[in-house]
Amino acid sequence: MIINNYHNLPQAANPHGIQSFKLHDSQYAQIMHLLLMPGEELKPHITPVDVTFYVLEGRPNILVGEENIQVETDDLVESPKNIVHCIYNKTEANVRVLVMKLPKPSAATIILDPNKK
């Protein structure tokens, strides 16, 4: 078992100048924890993979393509690949967001029998 907590990780370098922590990075997925202080934002950018944002705290504005919407804690926002997206913290409170770059599984889920060991 591998356990990561962003409090115990070094900040990951990024072109946005915000606090970013790499929770997971493998050939299959990348999960980042972003902390945006009041007034901070990501630079608009395009990624070659689908991106999902999960809002852990706060009410950021998230831009995906032409849509720029203020979302809330526990909202999940999907951004298709090759579409401009970014996050803005226009509030007076901190915003924390998980950014997940996860390819779709190429095989079916296998349900295990709990009675077999």
Image (spheres, rainbow, N blue to C red):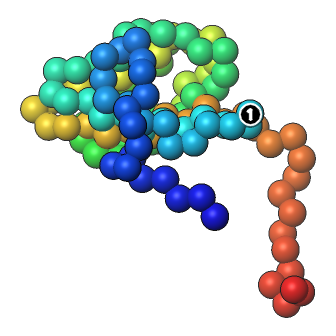
In the rendered view, would you say 107 is above or below 78? Answer: below
In the rendered view, would you say 36 is above or below 8? Answer: above
Report x, y in % for residue 109: 83, 57
Q: In this view, does 117 lie to the left or right of 9?
A: right
Labels in figure, total: 1
Q: Is residue 67 in view from this perspective?
A: no
Viewer-proximal residue among 87 and 8: 8
- Element at badge 1? loop
The answer to which quarter of the image holds residue 24 is: top right
Report x, y in % for residue 95: 26, 37
Report x, y in % for residue 4: 49, 53
x 33%, y 49%: residue = 7
Check the picture and name the quadrant holding the C terminus: bottom right
Residue at numbered disc 1: 27
Viewer-proximal residue among 87 and 20: 20
Q: Is residue 64 left or right of residue 83?
A: left
Report x, y in % for residue 63: 40, 18
x 66%, y 22%: residue = 49
Give the residue furthest to the bottom: 115
Q: Is residue 27 in view from this perspective?
A: yes
- Kind of residue at badge 1: Gln
Q: How crowded is mark 1: few (under 14 residues within 10 Å), some or many (20 or more)?
A: few
x 19%, y 30%: residue = 37
Q: In this view, does 93 lie to the left or right of 52?
A: left
x 10%, y 32%: residue = 92
Check the picture and name the quadrant holding the N terminus: bottom right
Viewer-proximal residue among 87 and 33: 33
In the rendered view, would you say 16 is above or below 55? Answer: above
The answer to which quarter of the image holds residue 105 is: top right
